[in-house]
């Protein structure tokens, strides 16, 4: 897919515009007990939306009921697999917005269980799109894509015109799912868009293992007083704090110029993994790490350096990240110090 030319930046939607768009609206958030989904649901509840959270709570997913503990009485929860076509059609009826964050996110697991990844990240997405086409064809649909579909970057920073060449099964399936969303816009008129997310982190992320983000594994080790491993260390990465990601989804939903398009989402300027490790330890006040060579199974699917050129999304929607990396790490550590037992 070829990106559109970067245009002059617009002002972001006003608080009044956002409130008017979502107040009283029936909204589905798939993957709504995960990192971004739960934060998005909480924001939408605060805006007066009628929020339906759909999450099947697969044991190895990012879904955690504690993530919505503060809003549990103010949302409707359906513990449903989006592969259940009949149930999804029932739930989608009347929805004005659909934020589609359900998926299998582990790159390594996708190589170990490729057919399961195919089922979750492709067939399930088509099931949802067919449900939208039948039950809420006028709804706005925002899909959580991934920068993994670019594979190993040929040039940096990576913009939306960069060739797509995934290095793992997860990337191939997420690429297909994104294409389905844009296809359904082009053929059926669904108001769909896709956000290619980079490393998203913050309170509520999965920290028990590396299925969602390596940052969580590092953070857990720090809080348990253990050294964490940095593989390689020179690779460059960029990071998006979860609240900034939520803003991106809200803006994508209410700015009509996003329909039928794909956008990169980034954040602060990129840092090396070693610099990130030092920053995390500084935020904690103590800790240590060990530099290791990449495990062979991980090295095969590592993409090397990556950071996003997200000027297109900023120009189209007025979005700007607000939380700097150091501040985001401090917020994350503070959250998990208080709620650690609910995440391990």
Image: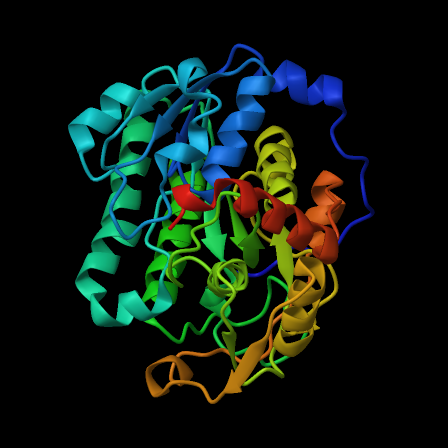
- Quarter of the image where one finds residue 78: top left
Residue 7 at x, y percent in the picture: 78, 50
Q: In this rendering, is residue 265 above or below 342?
A: below
User: At 41% from the left edge and 72% from the top edge, which residue is drawn?
Assistant: 166
Q: Nearer the viewer, residue 240 or 308?
A: 240
Determine if residue 273 is in view: yes
Side of 244 where 253 appears, left or right: left
State whether residue 203 is above or below residue 325: above
Residue 229 position, x and y percent, is 49, 77
Residue 5 appears in the rendering: no
Left or right placement of residue 315 versus residue 187 in this view? right
Residue 185 coordinates in the image, percent (x, y):
44, 39
Single out the residue that lies furthest toward the top.
24
Is residue 148 placed above or below 310 in the rendered structure?
below
Residue sitting nearer the eye, 107 or 189: 107
Q: Which one is in front, 20 or 225?
A: 225
Q: Where's residue 276, x and y in %?
A: 66, 69
> Measuring 57% from the left and 38% from the top, which residue is drawn there?
249
Number of residue marks: 0
């Amino acid at each position: 897919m070829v990106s559109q030319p970067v245009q002059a930046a617009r002002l972001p939607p006003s608080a009044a515009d956002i409130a008017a768009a979502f107040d009283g609206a029936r909204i589905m958030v798939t993957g709504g007990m995960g990192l971004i989904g739960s934060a998005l649901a909480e924001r939408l509840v605060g805006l007066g939306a009628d929020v339906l959270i759909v999450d099947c709570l697969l044991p190895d997913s990012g879904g955690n009921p504690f993530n919505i503990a503060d809003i549990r009485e103010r949302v409707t929860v359906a513990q449903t697999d989006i592969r259940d076509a009949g149930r999804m059609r029932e739930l989608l009826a009347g929805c004005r917005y659909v934020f589609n964050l359900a998926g299998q996110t582990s790159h390594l697991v996708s190589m170990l269980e490729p057919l399961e990844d195919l089922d979750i990240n492709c067939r399930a997405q088509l099931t949802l799109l067919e449900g939208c086409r039948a039950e809420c064809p006028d709804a706005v649909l925002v899909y959580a894509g991934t920068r993994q579909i670019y594979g190993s970057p040929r040039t940096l920073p990576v913009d939306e015109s960069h060739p797509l060449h995934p290095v793992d099964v997860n990337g191939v399936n997420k690429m297909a799912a994104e294409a389905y969303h844009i296809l359904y816009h082009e053929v059926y008129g669904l108001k769909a868009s896709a956000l290619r997310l980079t490393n998203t982190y913050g309170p509520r992320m999965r920290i028990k293992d590396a299925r969602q983000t390596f940052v969580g594994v590092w953070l857990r080790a720090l809080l348990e007083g253990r050294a964490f491993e940095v593989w390689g260390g020179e690779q460059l990465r960029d990071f998006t704090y979860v609240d900034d990601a939520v803003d991106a989804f809200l803006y994508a939903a209410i700015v009509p110029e996003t329909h039928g398009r794909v956008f990169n989402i980034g954040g602060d300027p990129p840092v090396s993994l070693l610099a990130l490790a030092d920053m995390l330890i500084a935020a904690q006040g103590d800790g240590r790490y060990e530099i290791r060579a990449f495990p062979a199974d991980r090295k095969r699917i590592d993409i090397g350096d990556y950071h996003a050129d997200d000027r297109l999304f900023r120009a189209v929607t007025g979005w700007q990240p607000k939380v700097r990396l150091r501040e985001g790490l401090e917020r994350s550590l503070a959250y998990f110090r208080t709620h650690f037992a609910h995440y391990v």
